[in-house]
Image (cartoon, helix red, strand yellow):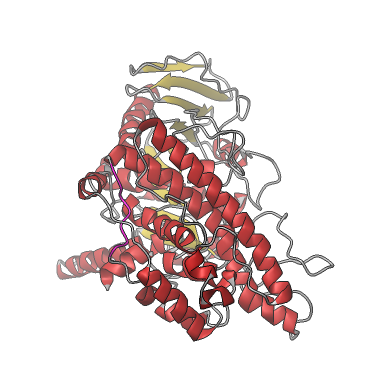
Amino acid sequence: MKTSFSKRVALLGAAALISISVTALPTSAHASAPQCTPPAAVVSCQGVTSDGAPYVMQVPGNFNGTAFIFSHGYRYNIDIPAAMPLIGGYTVTNTPQPGPLIYGKGSTVKNDTSVMKYMLSKGYAIFGSGFARQGWNADSGVATDVELINTFKAQFPTTKHVVAWGESLGGFMTQALAEKHPELVDATASLCVETGSIEASLTVAGDFLWGLKTFFDPTIKGGNYSAGAAGYAEAMGDLGKVFTVMGKLQKGIGIELATGKPQWPDTTPATITGSALAGIPSRSALLLVGLMAGVPTQSAHFDGSTGPGSVNSASYTGFAIAGSPALAVLENGVTSAALGVLVTYDVEQQAGGAIFDNSKTDYSARVASDAQVFNAGLSGATATGGLLQYLAAAPRATANATAVAKMRTLLAHTGKVNVPTIMLNSVNDAVAQGGNVQWVAQKYAAQYEAQKAANLKAGKPRGPINFLPIYAVPPAHYTKFDASGLPVTSTPAVNGTDHCNFTLKQYTTVVDLLGSAATAGKFPNMGPVKSAVRKMGAVYDPNFEPDLLKFYQDQQG
């Protein structure tokens, strides 16, 4: 959900490529034919689909017949007040976007359009819309993409192949498009993608938000927002409370690491501060919340294995095992909690009621294996047991059955791969963890084995591998410290962390693989594929299996 959650708003500026402006386009729900510039190095077209989505198309003079349709990530469907920390001042927009914008380690330029420039230089056409509705709009977004593909092909009849790709929610749409309309696309890539259903992703966010509410601020509503203006006010209030309590936790954890004395936020329930639990560091409770929700314990600046000073010193070891995982959960959790508020509010308004339910969730079972790995960070088995016992007795969230049923009618994936498909996620993405790709990888493994068996039985070759699960993985050590031993968090997010944080090389390698697959109907041999992925600084290895989201682990028992 790149556009909003990292406050790196992925909107194409007026002069970002050629000269794209949608201010004069009609906004009513009536299609307008593409309005194109005269033939030039790049022909630029604008228009509006029948549902009111503005779009742009860019076709180079050396068009090679392959066009890429891009679906952008989640954009908030409500304005965010300017006074709100981190994400304040956001205004709803439907500005069209024909390709990805780099913001991470691969660029020092805000909204870097290098990927799109590369594609145009290679003879690829690019196009994409701003969609008619913002927020969780997978159903309408796929319909827009279907119409837009047909519009593009009608406008440029020399088009031979169409590649669909997208980021975050746009990646979700891309996979759904290929499942429902494989006749329209020849290859796809879903980047920093959430897979399966919106329910799976909202469970991560909901669990984390409920943990914050239960341990640190019971006034957080955490869902079941009212309709209309009242619900908007409740959601904005929750955002403010979440950012406030995370700031208090950050300060408190710093004191805990320096003094060894527990520091709980002043909004912590009296049932904790007035009990033996108050003797447990708040960082341990926060780490537990992250583990039970599935929030990564490595983040943009905290690797979970590095401390200040010499490698064998107590300060190094203590920070690495006690401080770093909790601070990683905190850094990732800011994004996860914002997701928990804003997307829950969005989907609840569509579904008509509360959709998060943890009334039957066994958090002790969820963290059983992690509790051993992070024993020191959780302050030992006794402390962990006490915290889990408190969670077990705490009031749970109960969903509205009718609302849940309606939510489950929203577009979801089957996991079937119909065309050559790439999925690229950072393993430590706070929003779209690597387990999202693993969910599809498991589905495809069964699909491939069945197809191979059928082909061999018919005396045919086993068939090509059409699914490439690729992961951006950070180095083992990357946390930096200043001269006083404090962690440095002002540097760009490390590749393999953060949301949709990819390098130019990673994007362009995906483009090259997709272009080849669209033309050939399959990926190159695995040797060249593995070499290309290695050179782009990522991992393609069928034996590399990130943990599934907790939602799917619960289903598997």
Range shown magenta:
353-359
Q: Is residue 548 above or below residue 162?
A: below
Task: Indicate yes or no whether the magenta region holds residue 357.
Answer: yes
Q: Is residue 469 above or below residue 198?
A: below
Residue 317, x across and y down, in percent: 68, 81
Residue 56, x across and y down, in percent: 47, 26
Q: Is residue 436 left or right of residue 506?
A: left
Q: Is residue 142 left or right of residue 530?
A: left
Judge by depth and name the residue closer to the eye, 137 or 383.
Answer: 383
Q: Is residue 318 above or below residue 541?
A: below
Q: Is residue 216 left or right of residue 249?
A: left
Q: Is residue 160 above or below residue 108?
A: above
Q: Name the quadrant of the C terminus.
A: bottom left
Q: Residue at x 53, y 79 (%)?
A: 374
Judge by depth and name the residue closer to the eye, 6 or 251.
Answer: 251
Q: Main secondary structure of the magenta part?
A: loop
Task: Indicate yes or no whether the magenta region holds residue 400.
Answer: no
Residue 235, x across and y down, in percent: 45, 42
Q: Total of numbered circles in the picture?
A: 0
Q: Residue at x 34, y 42 (%)?
A: 347
Quick check: can you spot residue 118? yes
Quick check: can you spot residue 518? no
Among all residues in the image, which is located at the extreme left? 458
Residue 330, x across and y down, in percent: 58, 61
